[in-house]
Amino acid sequence: MKFSLASKTILVIDDYAAMRRAIRDMLYTLEAVTVIEASNGVGAINAMMNNRFDVVLCDYNLGDGKNGQQVLEEARLRKLIGQHCVFVIISAEQSTSMVLGAMDGKPDEYLAKPFNAQQLAGRLQRHFERKSFLAGVETEVLRGNLPKAIKLCDALLASGDKKMQTHLIKLRAELAINSGDYETARNLYRDILANRELPWAKLGLGIVEFRQNHYEHAVAIFEQLLKAQPMMMEVYDWLSKAYEELHKLSDAQAILSQAVHLTPQSILRQKKLAVTAERNGHFDVAEKAYQATMHIGKYSIHKSCEDFAGLAKVYTKTNAADKALHTLAEMRKEFLNSPEAELRSATIETELQKNLGNEDLAKKAFDKMLELSNRLPGKIPKDVQLDMVKTCFLSNEKEKAKELLESLIKTHVDDEAFLDTVREMQKDIGEEDFSETLIQKTKQMLIATNNRGVALYKQGKFAEAMALFETAMASMPDNKTIILNMLKIILHDLKFGDFHEDKLLRAKELLKRAQQIGIDPHKLGILKLECIEISQQRLIAG
Amino acid sequence: MIMINSLKSPEVFPAILASTVHDIKNSLGVLLELIRQMAVRQQPGEAENFSQLEFEANRINHSLMQLLVVYKIGASKFGLDIDEYAALDLIYEAKAQQDVMSKLKHVQVQVAGDADLLCYCDFAHISNALGTILNNALRYTHSAISLSVDKTDDGFVRFCIEDDGQGYPEHLLQADLRGFTNLDWVRGNAGLGLFFVSVVAGLHENGDKAGFVCIDNASRLGGARFCLFLP
């Protein structure tokens, strides 16, 4: 069958009119009918809001404004393109995939300039075939029905398509990781590696070790892989994460610095470097990385007032008050009418004015901070809350500090990385004992509640166990351990005890809540599977 | 305005190089598409000029990519992106890249190989390497070129490009394409192309085996034969 684009809706994005025309003419020779053009990122996003494209051909370099990668990120995050859409980034570089790295999401294809109609046709055809081959699996992944996705994937594997075999195994291993089935993933990667030293399989093996909390093993694998593949950017990201888990923050910073040097355009990597360097007290590195983050972020969907605040905090720590105030003013200008930006600004300004000895201005900023925080109940990011605690201490408002800190610790008592930043902040202002006592007390309370709840359940007192957890949840609304335990008990009870529609509903609610508060998807994988299985059995039984 | 002094700082060079390459490639892209469009409406007797234009534009592109590879190796920014591909997909990509030129020259390009044969390589680098050789073959062949791929007994995947032209000249046949002990043969477009293609092939390794290329005049069509082996 001859390749034809007649039925496809296509978007061409390039700032250079002659290039757009050349690509459009190429598409016409491939029988394309519906071709829409955009000359910049904003135009592209608008076009994607109004049309459902099958193919997007986007130049990486779009002059002023968003670049091609930023268009892709925004389109994906805002779900402006469907899974069937083939997104191609066109660039001058052969090895763009490496230069851009994967931290911000890869397109379906990188196409190097110059190219002709036949090359374009060949690439598009391969992607159309692959997408339709995998459509069933991808749809189930999107729906969150992992068991069905796995079943479909296994069926495709059994069909014996040699050309798709390795690709399917890769997908199957990722599905296994996402559903917490690490042994299957490990075996699949090992089988691939026994035949051929493929970098992605090695990376996968490292990720399995990481997910199973074997950080030393993961580090060894990632380091070995980097020696052979110094341009494989994902490895830097995983290696730095593993170092962080091992509390080797200066190693994490060194790896992030290397990665940023190789891919200066990656906003998320710059941001990670900024945060890590700040924690290590390397303020010069942090300053540069924050500035780069803000610069790249100008047209990015990842643009955030958190980065402006981060830079202002670095300046506060280095006693560069003018620069800090200037950065805060920039932030308020860039994020007009954003209560979060206002709150961040007031919080940092309190500390700044204190440092400068301007007690009146500090008091004014502090009052503004409290007033703004009352307007944002339950929506204040944890790092801002922590900064607020600090300013309360500095302003000698210990009661307020204690109140804020208590709720922060209750909610995040099982997030060791965050507790570390709490400890660091407290150490900074010489109040270590204060939070440590709270942390230990909260931990003990949590353990006691858990033990009591589980014991009650084991004695067959399901209702009492649930009531206990519901009470605990009321005092620690976003605590991950409690939600996970409640989920486990309800699901167990649904499976082996009496079935009640209400219980299933509550389980689904809790799953949703668990996702909202950011429990790692791989931890939720198995529970989600169980929930779906129970629903399905119910359908069959009913 | 560019501060001339800043050109002395080594950090500026990569950025300038990248922008320059980007600019030339934009130009080449538009140029190639214009050549194709004009060729459709060509007058009798112009075919030779159009195929020369197409050949030269492709040559500029390949030289540019080779230059970039050298720069990247020098700046420790070079890396291969190895994955598994259907061997025929690489051949089809090279054929597509040279599609306009082969039509202009009325050369029959045949493809042969097992659809299930897989190979491990950096897709962009290997398909470009094959495209470079094919571009040259299209210039020297009379009427036909054969592209084929198979697996050798010692486990290499072998890509062959055979033509029905005059064959390789003696000085290239004498060249050492694996050891590079003597680089006298690396001149002119054909020599340069061969040099880079053998460098790229050699960067592909598997265990103790590395990729390589060899050339002879044993083409089944009676002209030159080029073979690239991937481990």
Image (cartoon, grey):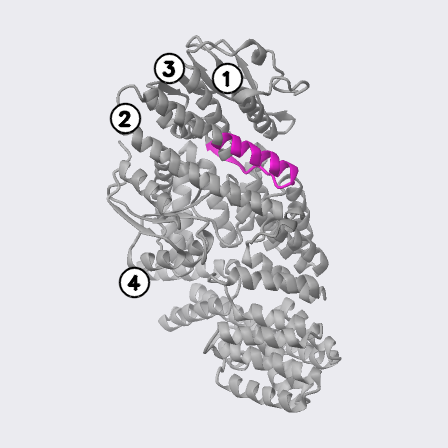
Pointer 4 residue: A542
Q: Where is residue B55 shown, x and y percent of the image?
A: 42, 25
Along the polypeptide, which appears first: circle 1 or circle 2?
Answer: 2
Whether residue A394 appears in this view of the structure is yes
Stretch in magenta:
B61-85
Pointer 2 residue: B42
Please rate how many residues cluster around mark 2, counting C-alpha atoms within 10 Å: few if below 14, some from 14 to 19, many from 20. Answer: few
User: Disc 1, disc 2: CB below 8 Å?
Assistant: no
Please rate how many residues cluster around mark 3, counting C-alpha atoms within 10 Å: few if below 14, some from 14 to 19, many from 20. Answer: many
Displayed quadrant of residue B230: top right
User: Disc 2, disc 4: CB below 8 Å?
Assistant: no
Q: CA distance from mark 2 to mark 3?
A: 23 Å
Badge 1 and badge 2 in a common chain: yes
Q: CA distance from mark 1 to mark 3?
A: 15 Å
Q: Mark 3 — on which chain does it sit?
A: B
Pointer 1 residue: B226
SS label for mark 3: strand
Q: Residue at x 61, y 19 (%)?
A: B177
* Residue A468, placed above or below residue A61: below
